[in-house]
Image: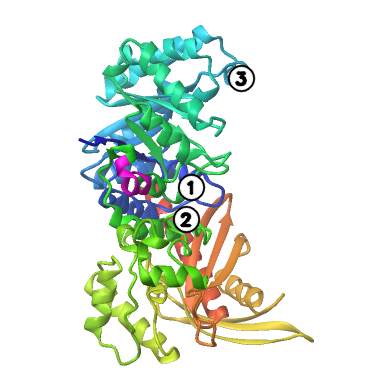
Amino acid sequence: MARQIKLFDTTLRDGEQSPGCSMNLQDKLEVAESLASLGVDIIEAGFAIASPGDFKSVQAIAKSIRGVTIASLSRALEKDIDASWEALREAESPRIHTFLATSPLHMEYKLKKTPDQVYEQAVAMVKYARNLCGDVEFSLEDASRSEPEFMYRVIEGVIAAGASTVNIPDTVGYAVPEEYAALIRNIRNNVPNVDKAVLSVHCHNDLGLGVANSLAAALAGADQIECTINGLGERAGNAALEEIVMNLYTRKEYYNMTTRVDSTRIWQTSRKVSKATGVRCQPNKAIVGDNAFAHESGIHQHGVLANRATYEIMTPESIGLPHNKMVLGKHSGRHAFEERLAYLGHRVSEERLNELFEAFKELADKKKTVSDRDIEAMVSGSSSGIPESFQLDRFVINSGSSMTATSVVRLKLRDGTKVEKVAIGDGPVDASFNAVDKIIGGSEIKLEDYNLQIVDATDTGADAQGESHVRITRDGRTWNGSGVSTDIVESSLRAYLFAINAMLYDLEQEKTRSAQ
């Protein structure tokens, strides 16, 4: 019988620590719901003491998400552990996750503590956390560069103090599979009480070995793997959940291990995370990249047509990726559109379905056919549930190689009034953004990132949709936005306004809370 491996997803904590990947509360709740539906065992919702926003998001996820353990990260300090417990206390299944570095390098230069002091602090803080919460995880930061004998001592001590899970992180992605597997086996053989706790691994991808190390550790006896959707995380990221799951699925005879994850929800969850963070996967990303199931070479195409197994070791359907191409156009009805949405994994309210169908009809008038990628982009670019303080009403561009770009933009305000401003800029998009800034008084907003790409790579004509992504900052905080249109300036404006509306909503919510 296959051994079941627990999956600890840290997309909302370690993944969000990736530069430019910050999410607002609504984004985090939607991602948490997707992770719970995907079937992960533990969701690390955040680092409660890091900021008021992190605390609120951990608290909101703990209150609303059921059927899965919710964890919050804490340094091995009473104030951190208290914050985590306060945020987690309404969770159906809460877990306090606390950590302390154990490598000589970290102990000397970062902690400035002796090994004995580190041991005492680790044991004391696990005991403290255990008195608050029945499920405590302890991580030995930089374990892969720690002294084995000292590591065994710490693991034995924290398990005796009440840790139900002990994590052995490859914090800086330094390990190689054979070495890391030996580390796990040695822990199994040298820690007397190790069978009283779940043994976990958390591998970073600095040398591109995050998934390989995680799987090697699982084969050597690790019970839990910590990972993120799309491999997001600090520096080069973490072991990617989708790659771990599909390795176990595709090579089940070799690994003889399984997870609770419903693999057919991987593609949808990956897209949800990309939308929330504003960071798309590179096209050749394993499992979820746009090219993962694409075949351009004539030899490959011939082989796949004869027998898909010639060049596909797993099917697109196994990750929830639709492979058929039902043609939708301007003559398609609401029922066909609704069925296509459901097939793509989107269950929407009646109100949102009306909104999406109207957008679909507008797009179908501009294009001969509407692809699955068009529909995905449409859903991503539609209402996120955040009130729209500003809506795009119209714009006019005047631009050329021998003149300064000028844009006239008119926005509709929440009260129904319309405001129009004109601005110049370095090109039509810059001029349009400047006009928006004039309307909203956005002098404190900084455009941090902007990118534009064709929604469907098979579209090369004038009717191809452009999908714009922007990242804005204000007072050190970040918001993402996305927009879709066959006009690149319109898609850019929609993305910019999406981010601005998200920012204004967050600031409005904070103001309301502080006044209470």
**Residue under circle 2?**
277
Q: As rendered, which of 61 and 377 lies closer to the eye?
A: 377
Dot 3 or dot 1, earlier in sequence: 3
| Labels 2 & 1 near each other (Cβ < 8 A) | yes
Q: Which residues are magenta?
A: 246-253
Q: Amino acid at mark 1?
A: Leu
Q: Position of residue 445 (x, y in %)?
A: 60, 61
Dot 2 or dot 3, earlier in sequence: 3
Local crowd size for mark 3, using a 10 Å CA cut-off: few (<14), some (14–19), many (≥20): some
Mark 2 or 3: in front is 3
Q: Position of residue 498 (x, y in %)?
A: 47, 68
Q: Secondary structure at mark 1?
A: loop
Viewer can see residue 83? no
**Residue under circle 3?**
105
- Which numbered circle lies on residue 232? 1
Q: Amino acid at mark 3?
A: Leu
Residue at horizontal 31 percent and vertical 92 percent from the top: 331
Q: Which SS does the magenta portion mostly show?
A: helix
What is the CA distance from the residue labelled 2 to the residue labelled 1? 10 Å
Local crowd size for mark 2, using a 10 Å CA cut-off: few (<14), some (14–19), many (≥20): many
Q: Amino acid at mark 2?
A: Thr
On the rendered structure, is 495 left or right of 134?
right
